[in-house]
Amino acid sequence: GVHAAALRGYLAELRDALALARALRRTLVLPRWTCWCDRMWSGSDDIFHFGCMYPGSQDGKFVPFACPMDHVLSPAAWAKAEVDYRDAAILDQPQLRASGAVVDVGLEPRPGWTRKAGSLPLGTSAAEARELLKPLAATPVLRLPHARGLLCSIDDDAAFNSLADRLLRIPTWCAKCFQPCSKELAGWLPAEEIRRGGGWDKMSYCMKVDVPPKFDAGGACSLNVQP
């Protein structure tokens, strides 16, 4: 469904955003996400019957909504790994509204890209990005428009792949169906997605979201999106 596809995209972009932040020795500022379905904390209700809103809150008609971190990632996993981050709300602080406190980094396709301040070619390496962004080392915040297709390779691929495998996973998301899920979810999800979630001819469904591709240990280009 739309929500699962959005989560896949968020995780894929986070792979590159986190890798770049670590390469630059900076703290990652999480992006502002949009969710098209509320999160079921217990998995004991039929959220689909209520328009993908938590039962009892559907009259608010709040979908889509700005979703918090715990709808996309596990804060506990990040705390356990001792990886620091900041919420997107930090950008609303008055001190970061000062001129020059936040610099927008441009992203351009590699063909035709020319080196200039505050610009990266898509499909770059962590090492190249680090070199290109050196002139902005004193800038408090570097803001990217997105991270789709940003990084091709990084320096510490094995260590980062291990870290990303722990951090870039959605929290458990399950829901009940009050008729066979294959019937109830037919209007929401393709049959294969229902099967993946264990809901075929059963009364419960757990959303499965693929983790981002790993960086290649041999140095081959591994983009987070299909070319």
Image: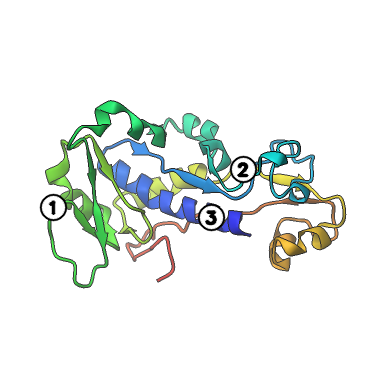
Where 181 falls versus 29 (above or below)?
below
Tag 2 residue: 62
What residue is drawn where x is 63% and y is 48%? 37
The N terminus appears in which quarter of the rendering? bottom right
Q: Which mark is residue 6?
A: 3
> Which residue type does callout 1 highlight?
Ala
> Which residue type does callout 3 highlight?
Ala
Asked whether disc 2 touches disc 3, contact meaning CB atoms under 8 Å apart, the reply is no
Query: Residue 180 occupies which quadrant of the picture?
Result: bottom right
What residue is drawn where x is 36% and y is 53%? 146
Q: Quick one: label 3 or label 1, which is nearer the N terminus?
A: 3
What residue is drawn where x is 51% and y is 47%? 34
Q: Nearer the viewer, mark 1 or mark 2?
A: 2
Asked whether disc 3 touches disc 1, contact meaning CB atoms under 8 Å apart, the reply is no
Viewer-side residue, 9 vs 95 = 95
Q: Is residue 101 left or right of residue 156?
A: left
Q: In the rendering, at what x and y percent does residue 101 appear? A: 21, 35
Viewer-side residue, 105 vs 168 = 105
- Label 3 sits on a secondary structure element that is helix
Q: Is residue 98 left or right of residue 1?
A: left
Tag 1 residue: 117
Q: Quick one: label 2 or label 3, which is nearer the N terminus?
A: 3
Q: Which mark is residue 211?
A: none
What's the distance in space between the residues labelled 1 and 2, CA to CA? 41 Å
